[in-house]
Image (tube, rainbow, N blue to C red):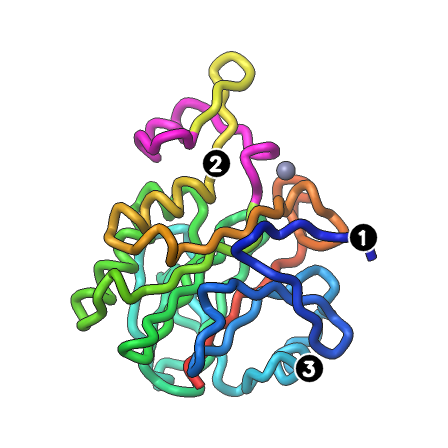
Amino acid sequence: MADLDVGPAFRLDWVADLPVLRARVLELSGIRHAFTTRHHPARDREVLWALGFDPQRVVEPEQVHGGAVVPVDGSTGGRVPGADGLWTDRAGLVLRVRAADCLPVLVADPRMGRVAAVHAGWRGLAAGILTRSVGVLREAGSRPEDLRCAIGPAVGPCCYEVDEPVRRALGEWFGAFRPGRPGRWQLDLRGVGRAQLIAAGVLPEHVGVCTACTACEPQWFYSYRREGRTGQLWALVSRV
Ligand SMILES: [Zn+2]
């Protein structure tokens, strides 16, 4: 298996002979998390059990590329319509988002014993979903300086060309757009995500970004931009 450079904020771990990505900022007592790779079989229950998550307690947002982040307590069923982000205080509840180029973002508040999982593509970021994620946690009593945020594998600026309407919708984020072909830009989606979290009050050293590009690493990741309709990687987080 070829090596994968995930950057200093992440590390490659092995569970049941399969590689998973761990964000160093989320390696906290009382929090369990994982980012899967393409090496995981499409057998939900087995993968979840192997990673230490109870398949019966998985909750995920519908993922409509919107800006809604909602609390869950396990009473709503496995899928929350209209949401792109979920958060919970409940131990054992497993929050999952799926992505193939978009940002999978996991958040933990170790002081409050609280976790969140958010799916954010350019539309979600334009709708301010990461700003809102910090906002809803703050309204529920979290302090932004306590939050630990991990941005998992996503498409890098190397492989993400966007046009003027996308640039206008996202607004100005320093360094996020590098000029490309005429009328086009190379977008650093992860950079926008990180900037949005920091602007909302998260400490820079508490935001861990995976530097691997989903479109550059076909052995490791699924990529919508490279492959069109494809599988999806999971980001999972739970309070244990
Ligand atoms: Zn790339």
Q: Which type of secondary structure does the marked residue at label 2 adopt?
A: loop
Seen in the picture, residue 235 relative to 102 is either above or below; the reply is below
Q: How far apart are marks 3 and 2 (CA)?
A: 34 Å
Q: In the rendered view, does 227 fall on the left or right side of 56?
A: right
Q: In the rendered view, does 62 fall on the left or right side of 1?
A: left
Q: Which of 236 and 31 is in front in this view?
A: 31
Q: At 66% across and 68% down in the image, what residue appears?
A: 13
Q: Do the residues labelled 2 and 1 touch (CB within 8 Å)?
A: no
Q: Residues within 10 Å of mark 1 (few under 14, many from 20)?
A: few
Q: Residues within 10 Å of mark 3 (few under 14, many from 20)?
A: some
Image quadrant where one finds the C terminus:
bottom left
- Give coordinates of residue 50: x percent, y percent: 66, 82
Closer to the observer: label 3 or label 2? 2
User: On residue 188, which mark appears?
Assistant: 2
Q: Which type of secondary structure does the marked residue at label 3 adopt?
A: helix
> Is any part of residue 211 visible from this angle?
yes
Seen in the picture, residue 142 relative to 63 is either above or below; the reply is below
Write down the region rendered in magenta. Answer: 155-176
User: On residue 201, which mark appears?
Assistant: none
Q: Distance between the residues labelled 1 and 3?
A: 25 Å
Residue at image mark 1 = 2
Amino acid identity at mark 3: Glu
Q: Quadrant of residue 40?
A: bottom right
Q: Which type of secondary structure does the marked residue at label 1 adopt?
A: loop
Q: At 20% across and 65% down in the image, what residue appears?
A: 138
Q: Which of marks 2 and 1 is nearer the N terminus?
A: 1
Residue at image mark 3 = 46
- Give coordinates of residue 165: x percent, y percent: 39, 26
101 drawn magenta: no
Residue at disc 3, CB closer than 8 Å to ligand 1: no
